[in-house]
Amino acid sequence: MSWVAWRQFRPQALVTLALLGAFAVLVLVSGLHLRGAAGSLGGARCAARGDCRALLGHAKPLADLLGPALIALPALLGMFWGAPLVARELESGTYRLAWTQSVSRRRWLSVRVALVGAAALAVAGLASWLVSWWFAPVDAVNMNRFDPSVFTARGVVAVGYAAFAFALGVASGAVARRTLPAMVVTLLGFVAARIAFTLWVRAHLLATSTSLASPTAGKDVGFLGTPTSVKLFASLPSIPNAWPLSSALVDRAGRVLGAARLHAALARGCPAIASGLPQNPGNATKGHAGLVGGTFEPCLRRLAHQLRLRVTYQPPSHFWPLQALETGIFLAAGLALLALTV
């Protein structure tokens, strides 16, 4: 049975091996060149200066290819390796021969899934290691490991994605009984699962941390007057290699300011801006009373003893635990789909 499974999988395996070899040569050669450029351009020094445009511009052409390629790889493995595994037998009618021999259907499926699935995990793992290695000088400068396009193209999560996509393809083929519909379901299901996990699940896998900073730490901080309310607003500050999730301007007691306390604080620290805000929120008009920069930044500095920017975030130390948790969840989902197939 193992020999038959290998003979059926051999053309796909050899083509993939050739493509992976070419990919590895490209990544290794260009990665060594990128490390040389980082050394000559002073990657650490430019990061300290906050100006690494030369290094990032040097890496950009291939970076725009490698990241999306690794993100797409699990979906391709699920579509072209997982979906035809059972669907092709059912669609072509060869199951009448394959499943009536001395080998049981369960053993036939187990051997095929073990062989092709292990190959899919190995391809995804090796590709992920190559991409993570290539991007190391760029990540050391950008310090944005939790950015969705970075998090999903580094570390070990690609292995979990590949396992889930492959198992989804196998299960879709068993249910749809035709290869092309199974491939479509695999692609749509994988994309939907990835989007849902990124937007609604990942941020809640581990407990977050909270810190207080000066109100001038936000990229965009100000006072907003609308027809229904007057409130403070703040965009997320940049925290190296952390994942800011939410931010709010609060008073010294940690309370988010309402309209009354807002006017009181502004009247003490920034009377010129306070006079421009509506006293009656119901009669307010849309618009910003002020933004960081220009005459508003001195106002925020004067209010710094009264206000703080409260930031909720996933700290840098949570990168690998979140990688492990997400990988485990997708592996478990893949096992559940294979149980459905059986």
Image (spheres, rainbow, N blue to C red):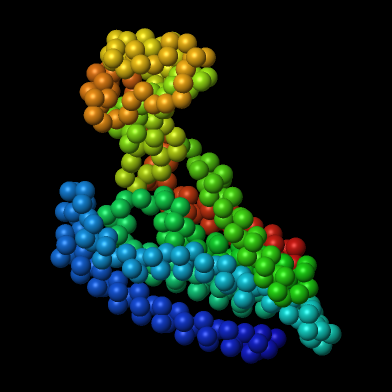
Residue closer to the observer: 298 or 97? 298
Query: From the viewer's perspective, is 257 left or right of 218?
Result: right
Instruction: Locate the C terminus and report the quarter of the image it occupies.
Output: bottom right
Q: Position of residue 178 (x, y in %)?
A: 76, 75
Quadrant housing residue 35: bottom left
Above or below — where is 325 with respect to 103?
above
Q: Evaluate whether residue 233 shows in this view.
A: yes
Q: Position of residue 107 (x, y in %)?
A: 74, 77
What residue is rendered at 23% in x and 57% in y?
A: 53
Corner quadrant of residue 39: bottom left
Q: Residue at x 82, y 88 (%)?
A: 97
Can you see residue 167?
no
Q: Nearer the viewer, residue 120 or 100?
A: 120
Residue toward you, 217 or 275: 275
Q: Is residue 305 left or right of residue 200?
A: left
- Return the x and y of residue 321 as percentages of the image width and height: 46, 50
Picture residue at 41% right of the left edge, 82% below the top = 22
